[in-house]
Amino acid sequence: MSLINTSPLAASENATADALQAARRDLAAVFRIAAQLGLHEGTCNHFSAVAPGRPDCYLINPFGLHFAEMRASDLLLVDDAGTVLEGSGEVEITAFHIHSQIHRANPRAVCVLHTHMPHATAITALHDGRLAMCHQNAVRFHGRIAYDHDTTVGYQGLALAGEEGARMVRALGEHSVLFLRSHGPIVVGPTIAQAFDDLYYLERAAQVQVLASSMGQPLAEIEPALAARTAADFLRDAPRYARAHLDAWQRMLERADPSWRM
């Protein structure tokens, strides 16, 4: 007769393994969703999430895989030095310098999403590009966006050294979103679901701004106090709404192609 090991240590290890697998699936789903929505750019953008129970390690996409083909098992588990602990492949160099620095410096950044999604990136291409508080989706981000051209000269080329990642950390500060001039946005969140929800609505807000600006009339900016109050209303229920949003996408992915979760 075999006995089931119910020791506290074994239970803790099983819970950590289950949480890691759930994180793999959530992050893989976000890659697939980003591809469906056209938020990716070739194989060059990168998403990461701190490994549950292992704060010095994180999951990240391997170099060369397209977002549309990402599976939970494809994600690399790497340590703070970029050493691959689980998975096959290598971490792209700019991904390492950006994500390792942000995860290390910012405990709130459980998930870090960096894309060149078109409308938000278009705003970063303006001389003083900022997300205007001209729409309900935009006021979600009232007081939550940092702009690197506020603290530095902006674009510094490819992140081929740790100092560029450190510069981004300083520019991000306590904010949830960083607009990198002439580059693209970085979104961080306390969970994968919340970071994804912000990424999605950031691009929707930017899309409205770009379309409205094309009509040649002044934007109808929302009064700051009202924008701040509405942002607080959004934040109060953000975890619940973000989880429901990602769950809904996962159901749709499952019906279309369940390989993402493998």
Image (cartoon, rainbow, N blue to C red):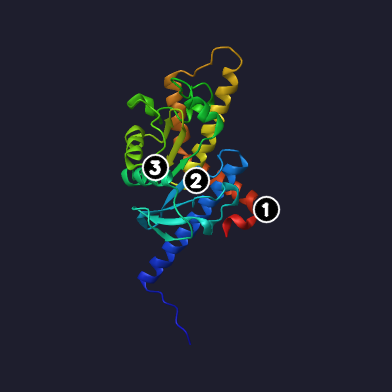
Q: Report the front residue among 52 and 101.
A: 101
Q: Quadrant of the C terminus?
A: bottom right
Q: Relative to the observer, which residue lies in front, 235 or 47?
A: 47
Q: Amino acid at mark 3?
A: Ile
Q: Label 3 to label 1, Cα distance in Å?
A: 34 Å
Percent coordinates x, y for residue 181 in the rendering: 43, 28
**Nearer to us in this view, 227 or 195:** 195
In the picture, measured across the screen, residue 28 lies left or right of residue 11, that is right
Circle 3 Cα neighbour tier, 10 Å, few/some/many (<14 / 14–19 / ≥20)? many
Residue occupying the point 33% across, 27% down: 152
Name the secondary structure under disc 2. helix
Using a 10 Å C-alpha cutoff, classify the residue at mark 2 as few (fewer than 14 neighbours), some (14 to 19) or many (20 or more).
many
- Residue matched to label 2: 193
Q: Observer-nearest residue: 89 or 214?
A: 89
Disc 1 and disc 2 in contact, CB within 8 angstroms: no
C-alpha separation, residue under disc 1 versus residue under disc 2:
20 Å
- In space, the residues marked 2 and 3 are separated at their CA atoms by 20 Å
Three-letter residue code for mark 2? Ala
Q: Which mark is residue 137?
A: none
Whether residue 105 is visible here, answered yes or no, is yes
Looking at the image, is mark 3 or mark 1 earlier in the sequence?
Answer: 3
The residue that label 1 is drawn on is: 255
Identify which residue is drawn at 51% across, 32% down: 202
Secondary structure found at label 1? helix
User: Mark 1 Cα within 10 Å, few/some/many (few <14, many 20+)?
Assistant: few
- Against 53, residue 195 (above or below) is above
Task: Find numbered disc 3 in the image and state the secondary structure of the residue it sits on.
Answer: helix
Q: Are marks 2 and 3 in contact (CB under 8 Å)?
A: no
Q: Residue furthest bottom?
A: 1
